[in-house]
Amino acid sequence: MTNRTREEQARSLLNDKLYNEAFDQLAENLHNTWYNSSVNDVESREQAWLSLRLLERLRLHLTSIVETGEMAKKLKEYHI
């Protein structure tokens, strides 16, 4: 897969309403699980926290692909 294709697919996902709705709903559910867990339920809190971090990393990775593609275009445009 070319870098341009990766950038286009990543941009498409980040702009997709259903994708964002799913991510946001999942993050909200995980946050509620974490927030409403009992004092003694350390395992559930840790799982929710780790899952929230993973969601964040996935979104950041896709954003990075898009930004890297934009930077490459600028560098090419300015012949750097």
Image (cartoon, rainbow, N blue to C red):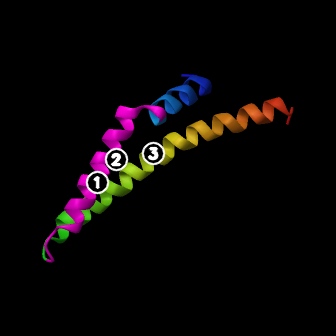
Labels 1 and 2 touching (C-beta < 8 A)? yes
Q: Nearer the viewer, mark 3 or mark 1?
A: 1
**Amino acid tagged 1:** Glu
Q: Main secondary structure of the magenta part?
A: helix
Task: Give whichever of discs 3 and 2 has the lower sequence position.
Answer: 2
Q: CA distance from mark 3 to mark 1?
A: 15 Å
Look at the image and tell me in which quarter the N terminus lies. top right
Identify the image quadrant of residue 5. top right
**Residue at 60 percent of width and 27 percent of height:** 3
What secondary structure is marked by label 3? helix
**Amino acid tagged 3:** Arg
**Residue range (magenta):** 15-39
**Amino acid tagged 2:** Asp
Which residue is disc 2 drawn over? Answer: 24
Q: Residues within 10 Å of mark 3 (few under 14, many from 20)?
A: some
Q: Nearer the viewer, residue 1 or 25?
A: 25
**Residue at 25 percent of width and 56 percent of height:** 30
Task: Give whichever of discs 3 and 1 has the lower sequence position.
Answer: 1
Identify the image quadrant of residue 40. bottom left
**Residue at 73 percent of width and 31 percent of height:** 73
Residue 62 x, y percent position in the rendering: 50, 40
Residue 80 x, y percent position in the rendering: 85, 36
**Residue that lies at the very extreme toward the right in this rendered image:** 79
Q: Nearer the viewer, mark 3 or mark 2?
A: 2
The numbered mark at residue 59 is 3
Q: CA distance from mark 3 to mark 2?
A: 11 Å
Which residue is disc 1 drawn over? Answer: 28
What secondary structure is marked by label 2? helix
What secondary structure is marked by label 1? helix
Determine if the magenta segment contains residue 25: yes
**Left or right of 19: which side holds 80?**
right
